[in-house]
Image (spheres, rainbow, N blue to C red):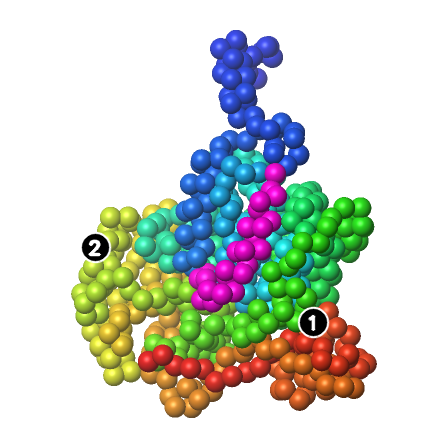
């Protein structure tokens, strides 16, 4: 800025100072967990509204585990803990998301989720309770409100426009961007280490007041540390808890030391003892949910909808509840398959799609082509989207099993010609499952085996056909990998089973 235009340093204008002072007073709140006054730009009602929107989006994209008994059990443990939360101006809820990775997170407004992958590696109700209490701690300490204050105007889910550059909105923008940017963004945020430590301290005290052993948090973090080491060695189960919950040996030791200083009295557990707790988990789905389709290499197989589609080799693959997608290694091209919302034959579905698109963005539609794909009616067209940059879409609609599927390929104009061959090849691969493909589909479930006299963990695994490696089994059970187990010791194992088709 030119020095001649600078305002001489002086005290703020009286009117501005009063406005700022008034805003600060309105935005200050007493943190119910710490008792400290802090600036927040989101009151409880607004937080509840934002949380409800976020919960709807999370459940739509991640899905919930369809096990009423298990989710009711998790909710009962959570409600017992929430009764001792220092913050009671939001309604708490506890649900299980259909994710194979181990994770837990809290949304604004008291929505708390654990994944089925996390449940698979818990070994006691104390551990589960401490994880839930940790997430309650984030809500109680207003951590989401603090983050919102720092963002001051950032939307609910931040969707970085790596391909579309901000020129695509509505239907196409959501399809291209959302599956790659939900986790770890916006409300499912990575908390800083100070917030994690605060949630640890609050969570252990909440758990203790509810009658749970606060050392359960340290025990669970220890399992995660070991699993993280397995991942680094290429032998882990793909846990992602550390992506949003930084964990260190120091944190494990801190929570262990803190647990010894917390006074607590045991209240009867809902599932007392390891055997009763593991019985709750028996039959839990492990890995990919075949009801949402499975990947075999780069080929996607959907048993219930009876189709297969090959995605480009080497691309990052994503399978969500409402779509399946792939991203090029350089992040500059994407391919998304979903069930189209527009009814009718493929050509009519395309017309309806472009009619909706015209309300959001300028585009040029190429000449369409009707053809058959795997014996089914199909329609193909290329479109150019106009804006600050230019993106080309390669779109194919195909009618299958009474549904219309849309395959959307997107790439910048300058690289579209080179990338389009991948889009065309994937579309051409769409067809019904072969008998061999159907026979190859399996589901892996958690089962509880019982050790026999003199058996080691390896012996149990061999006897029941455990799909987990010995290190994975030892970590998931908090049991030694070598040596004889006590007789009648319950052991979690992963058992492959045939997929039951619902067609």
Reading the image, the residue beneath label 1 is: 477
In this picture, which residue range is highlighted in magenta? 62-86
Q: At 21% from the left edge and 55% from the top edge, which residue is drawn? A: 355
Q: How many marks?
A: 2
Q: At 71% from the left edge and 54% from the top edge, which residue is drawn? A: 266
Label 2 vs label 1: CA separation? 55 Å
**Quarter that holds the C terminus:** bottom left
Q: At 61% from the left edge and 34% from the top edge, which residue is drawn? A: 32
Does the rendering let one see residue 230? no
Does the rendering let one see residue 436? yes
| Percent position of residue 29, x then y | 57, 28
Kindly report which numbered mark, 2 or 1, lies closer to the viewer in this rendering: 1
**Quarter that holds the N terminus:** top right
| Percent position of residue 383, x then y | 28, 60
Mark number displayed over residue 355: 2
Q: Main secondary structure of the magenta part?
A: helix
Could you tell which of marks 2 and 1 lies nearer the N-terminus? 2
| Percent position of residue 358, x then y | 24, 51
């Amino acid at each position: 800025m030119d020095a001649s235009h600078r305002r001489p340093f002086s005290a703020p204008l009286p009117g501005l100072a009063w406005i700022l002072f008034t805003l600060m007073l309105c935005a200050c709140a007493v943190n119910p967990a710490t008792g400290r006054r802090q600036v927040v730009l989101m009151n409880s009602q607004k937080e509840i509204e934002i949380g409800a929107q976020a919960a709807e989006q999370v459940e739509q994209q991640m899905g919930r585990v369809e096990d009423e008994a298990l989710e009711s059990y998790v909710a009962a443990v959570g409600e017992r803990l929430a009764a001792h939360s220092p913050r009671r101006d939001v309604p708490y809820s506890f649900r299980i998301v259909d994710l194979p990775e181990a994770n837990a997170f809290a949304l604004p407004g008291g929505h708390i989720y654990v994944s089925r992958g996390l449940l698979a590696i818990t070994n006691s109700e104390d551990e589960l309770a401490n994880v839930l209490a940790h997430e309650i701690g984030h809500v109680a300490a207003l951590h989401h409100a603090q983050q919102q204050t720092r963002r001051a105007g950032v939307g609910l889910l931040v969707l970085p426009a790596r391909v579309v550059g901000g020129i695509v909105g509505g239907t196409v923008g959501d399809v291209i961007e959302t599956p790659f940017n939900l986790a770890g963004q916006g409300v499912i945020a990575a908390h800083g280490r100070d917030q994690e430590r605060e949630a640890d301290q609050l969570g252990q005290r909440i758990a203790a007041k509810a009658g749970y052993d606060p050392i359960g948090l340290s025990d669970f973090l220890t399992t995660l540390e070991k699993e993280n080491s397995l991942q680094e060695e290429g032998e882990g189960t793909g846990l992602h808890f550390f992506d949003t919950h930084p964990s260190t040996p120091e944190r494990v030791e801190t929570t262990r030391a803190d647990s010894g200083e917390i006074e607590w009295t045991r209240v009867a557990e809902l599932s007392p003892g390891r055997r009763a707790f593991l019985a709750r988990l028996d039959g839990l789905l492990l890995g990919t949910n075949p009801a949402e389709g499975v990947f075999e290499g780069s080929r996607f197989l959907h048993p219930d909808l009876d189709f297969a589609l090959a995605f480009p080799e080497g691309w990052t693959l994503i399978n969500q509840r409402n779509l399946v997608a792939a991203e090029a290694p350089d992040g500059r091209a994407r391919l998304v398959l979903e069930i189209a919302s527009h009814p009718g034959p493929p050509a009519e579905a395309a017309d309806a799609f472009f009619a909706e698109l015209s309300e959001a963005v300028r585009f040029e539609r190429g000449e369409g082509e009707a053809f058959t794909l795997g014996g089914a009616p199909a329609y193909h067209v290329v479109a150019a989207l106009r804006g600050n940059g230019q993106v080309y879409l390669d779109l194919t609609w195909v009618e299958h099993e009474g549904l219309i599927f849309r395959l959307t390929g997107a790439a910048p104009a300058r690289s579209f010609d080179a990338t389009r061959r991948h889009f065309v090849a994937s579309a051409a691969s769409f067809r019904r499952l072969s008998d061999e493909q159907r026979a190859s589909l399996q589901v892996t479930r958690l089962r509880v085996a019982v050790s026999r006299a003199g058996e080691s963990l390896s012996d149990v695994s061999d006897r029941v056909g455990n799909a987990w490696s010995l290190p994975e089994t030892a970590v998931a059970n908090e049991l030694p990998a070598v040596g004889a187990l006590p007789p009648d010791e319950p052991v979690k194992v992963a058992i492959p089973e045939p997929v039951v088709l619902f067609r």
